[in-house]
């Protein structure tokens, strides 16, 4: 018999990434009387969100910003009182480039992931051939699919609407850079449903984007790539976000270095969590805020069918080489937020981000902070390379593409094996089956980036919804 560690808890949360922390904070806001513990196996909370300070650089190990038009992350910052600590992305550098036949070319101003909000910049850009441009213009006349038609992958959807060249040269690299996904498998309905809504509502993506631009002149006019004007970051990095939540939770809620290795449920309907040290935690309600494949492992003895659905959500990995480089090492200073690399260019990198151009305070005076991304679903073999090989490739690419000279002043490599859930075709239906099954099991919730969006705001939203459902309360904590 294992020792029972505490009195029966009202709620246990497994996983201390942003999802688990957001859930804990929501419970604290709407039901502070409940006894809650959040169990995190590492020595720190935050999960993939971690900021390191190295040689005067502020380096994000994963996410370096979050979007504000999905309100849930910014709302949480307001409720925590850290809204004044948020930096807007640097307005003078809000643009991105794409590699085109070995050269960096600006993504046409107003081109946003899937299509243009302005015609002229695309028409004068050298990225597309005349034929590609004509096909792009014709997108307006491509008939919309009947509602209820079978689900399309990202490549099927974008090639049908815009033609292969626009897909290969612009859409694929932008989507690949954001989702680290294989566009032949990525579901548009799950990853970017707003484009399906645009097709249905306006009959065309171009028309939908132009109409949305009318409604939001400021952001759509200038941005290219990923709507950068909508992004913010905490002044001290995302660590500031997660550590603020953890430090404001009542003492004892966060239990670090505590791995949960098994789950069972007794006839009394209480959950019994097994800790790695053999001790047992008993709780009434359980929130699993961990990746789907890890939730599957824990739930396997309890519900093999549910575990099978969770296990079927595939994850991809990536590696990020972070380099500090002196300004004089670049003949032409790198402009914009970075660049993405189309698969048709056959290079070894996915994208490069100029972190110090995005937000102030990321690099010491006279230096750039550059992050080079490898791997993803389409170049998973790059994850097999050693750290020194990846750093060497990153430097070679910077020398070739940006005429960098010499060696970086600082270097760090971060690896994220199996960190990015892939929303393959069929994802929404799978999530619905998972949620239907979870709804039948009393007092259980699954949250995290595997279900309704990988971004920080979506993780927070999923967590807050789950808490409201478990507690049977809706809250008035929304500030926007
Ligand atoms: C390289 C990269 C770049 C990204 N860039 C952006 C970006 O710019 N903007 C954006 O919005 N999003 C970005 N994302 C996505 C976003 O950061 C993540 O989706 C989100 O932070 C995931 O949070 P989570 O809490 O769901 O999961 P995680 O952060 O994975 O947290 C899960 C936690 O559970 C713990 N755990 C697991 N199993 C157990 C167990 N058995 N017992 C106890 N603890 C356990 C883990 O240690 C971990 O701390 C990026 C992600 C990556 C990897």
Image (tube, rainbow, N blue to C red):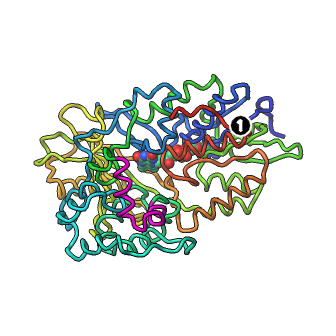
Left or right: 25 as drawn, with respect to 480? right
* Vertical arrangement, residue 379 with respect to residue 215, above or below: below
Is any part of residue 441 visible from this angle?
Answer: yes
Q: Main secondary structure of the magenta part?
A: helix
Left or right: 160 as drawn, with respect to 9? left
Q: Position of residue 217 (x, y in %)?
A: 32, 47
Given residues 332 and 106, the one toward you in this image is: 106
Q: Position of residue 457 (x, y in %)?
A: 50, 43
* Vertical arrangement, residue 401 with respect to residue 69, above or below: below
Magenta residue check for 449: no
Residue at image point 76% right, 44% down: 443
Residue at image point 44% right, 29% down: 83
Is any part of residue 385 visible from this angle?
Answer: no
Q: Residues within 10 Å of mark 1 (few under 14, many from 20)?
A: few
Residue at the far left in the pictured view: 331
- Find residue 252 and report its image quarter: top right
Residue at image point 50% right, 35% down: 480
Q: Which residues are magenta?
A: 195-216
Magenta residue check for 207: yes
Given residues 11 and 153, the one toward you in this image is: 153
Given residues 262 and 361, the one toward you in this image is: 361
Given residues 388 and 67, the one toward you in this image is: 67
Left or right: 70 as drawn, with respect to 274? left
What residue did someone put label 1 on?
Answer: 473
Callout 1: CB less than 8 Å from ligand 1? no
Q: Position of residue 78 (x, y in %)?
A: 49, 29
Residue at image point 62% right, 45% down: 289
Residue at the far right in the pictured view: 267
């Amino acid at each position: 018999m294992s020792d029972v560690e505490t009195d029966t808890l009202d709620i246990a949360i497994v996983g201390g990434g942003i999802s688990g922390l957001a859930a804990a904070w929501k419970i604290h806001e709407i039901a502070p009387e409940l006894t809650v513990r959040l169990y995190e196996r590492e020595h720190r909370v935050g999960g993939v969100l971690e900021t390191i300070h190295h040689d005067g650089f502020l380096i994000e190990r994963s996410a370096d910003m979050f979007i504000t038009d999905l309100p849930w992350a910014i709302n949480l910052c307001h409720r925590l009182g850290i809204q004044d600590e948020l930096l807007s992305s640097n307005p003078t550098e809000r643009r991105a480039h794409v590699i085109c036949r070995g050269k960096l070319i600006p993504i046409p101003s107003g081109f946003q992931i899937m299509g243009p909000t302005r015609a002229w910049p695309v028409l004068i850009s050298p990225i597309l051939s005349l034929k590609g441009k004509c096909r792009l213009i014709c997108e307006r006349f491509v008939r919309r699919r009947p509602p209820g038609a079978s689900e399309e992958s990202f490549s099927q959807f974008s090639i049908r609407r815009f033609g292969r060249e626009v897909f290969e040269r612009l859409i694929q690299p932008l989507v690949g850079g954001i989702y680290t996904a294989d566009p032949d498998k990525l579901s548009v309905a799950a990853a970017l449903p707003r484009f399906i809504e645009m097709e249905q509502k306006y009959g065309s993506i171009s028309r939908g984007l132009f109409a949305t631009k009318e409604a939001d002149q400021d952001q759509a006019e200038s941005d290219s790539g990923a709507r950068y004007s909508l992004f913010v970051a905490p002044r001290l990095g995302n660590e500031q976000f997660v550590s603020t939540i953890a430090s404001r939770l009542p003492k004892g809620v966060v239990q670090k270095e505590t791995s949960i290795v098994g789950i069972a449920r007794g006839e009394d309907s209480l959950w019994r969590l097994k800790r790695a040290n053999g001790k047992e935690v008993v709780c009434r309600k359980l929130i699993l805020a961990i990746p789907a494949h890890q939730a599957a492992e824990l739930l396997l003895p309890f519900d093999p069918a549910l575990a099978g659905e969770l296990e079927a959500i595939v994850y991809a990995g990536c590696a990020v080489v972070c380099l500090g480089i002196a300004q004089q090492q670049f003949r032409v200073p790198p402009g914009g937020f970075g660049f993405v690399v189309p698969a048709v260019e056959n290079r070894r990198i996915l994208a490069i981000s100029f972190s110090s151009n995005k937000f102030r305070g990321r690099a010491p005076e006279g230096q750039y902070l550059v992050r080079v991304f490898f791997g993803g679903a389409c170049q998973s073999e790059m994850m097999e390379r050693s750290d020194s090989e990846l750093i060497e490739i990153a430097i070679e690419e910077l020398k070739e593409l940006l005429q960098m000279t010499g060696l970086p002043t600082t270097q760090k490599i971060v690896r994220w094996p199996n960190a990015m859930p892939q929303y393959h075709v069929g994802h929404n239906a799978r999530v619905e089956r998972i949620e239907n099954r979870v709804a039948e099991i009393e007092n259980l919730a699954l949250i995290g980036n595997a279900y309704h969006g990988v971004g920080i705001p979506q993780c927070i939203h999923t967590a807050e919804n789950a808490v409201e459902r478990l507690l049977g309360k809706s809250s008035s904590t929304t500030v926007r």
